[in-house]
Image: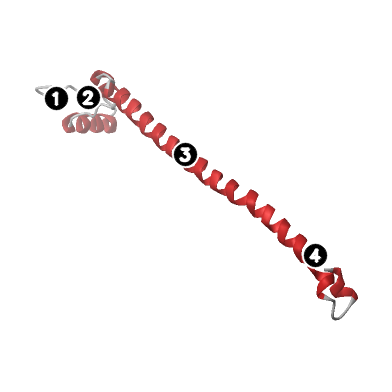
Amino acid sequence: FSEFTAKANPDVAELAPGISKALITTLFGLSVTVPALASFAFFRNRIDELVAQSSLLAEHVFADFKRSTPVAAKQSAKPQRKRPEEELAQRLADQQGTRPSSPPGG
């Protein structure tokens, strides 16, 4: 294509080898690129499937693990809340500076 810079109107016979070389190079480039992109798409989709399957498997494994946790451990992990009467007695005792007496029936 250097003929364009050298002459205003280059001869077709002078341009033909450059055009031929460009077309052949493009053909070889596409013959490598198209299969490479197809392979990339195939393997990317396969990896996505494997990730999804392993994620589901992990969820099932951990769901079974969560269900097998003893009930006593779950209850001890929760803070025990006092009954309203006990909370009121504690607040009154804190205000008066004395210890609360145990409420009747408790």
Q: Amino acid at mark 2?
A: Pro
Q: Amino acid at mark 4?
A: Gly
State the image coordinates of residue 51 (x, y, percent, origin top left): 44, 36
Which of marks 4 and 3 precedes in the sequence?
A: 4
* Depth order, front residue of 63/80: 63
Disc 1 versus disc 4: nearer the observer: 4
From mark 3 to mark 2, how far is it between C-alphas? 68 Å
Residue 44, compared with residue 74, is above or below; it is: below
Which of marks 2 and 3 precedes in the sequence?
A: 3
Of the numbered discs in the image, which one, if any, rests on residue 103? Answer: 1
Residue 2, quarter of picture: bottom right
Q: Amino acid at mark 1?
A: Pro
> Which residue does the numbered mark 4 point to in the structure image?
18
> Which residue does the numbered mark 2 point to in the structure image?
100
> Which residue does the numbered mark 3 point to in the structure image?
46
State the image coordinates of residue 6 (x, y, percent, origin top left): 90, 74
From mark 2 to mark 1, how far is it between C-alphas? 8 Å
The answer to whether marks 2 and 1 mark residues whose Cβ atoms lie closer than 8 Å is no
Residue 56, compared with residue 64, is above or below; it is: below
Which of marks 3 and 1 precedes in the sequence?
A: 3
From mark 1 to mark 4, how far is it between C-alphas? 103 Å
State the image coordinates of residue 25 (x, y, percent, origin top left): 73, 56
Determine the residue positioned at 64% across, 49% down: 32
Describe the element under mark 1 as helix, strand or loop: loop
CA neighbours of label 4 inside 10 A, class few (<14), some (14 to 19), many (20+):
some
| Residue extending furthest toward the right | 6
Residue 57, compared with residue 73, is above or below; it is: below
Which of marks 2 and 4 precedes in the sequence?
A: 4
State the image coordinates of residue 55 (x, y, percent, origin top left): 40, 34
Direction from residue 22 to residue 96 in the image, left or right: left
From mark 4 to mark 2, how far is it between C-alphas? 101 Å
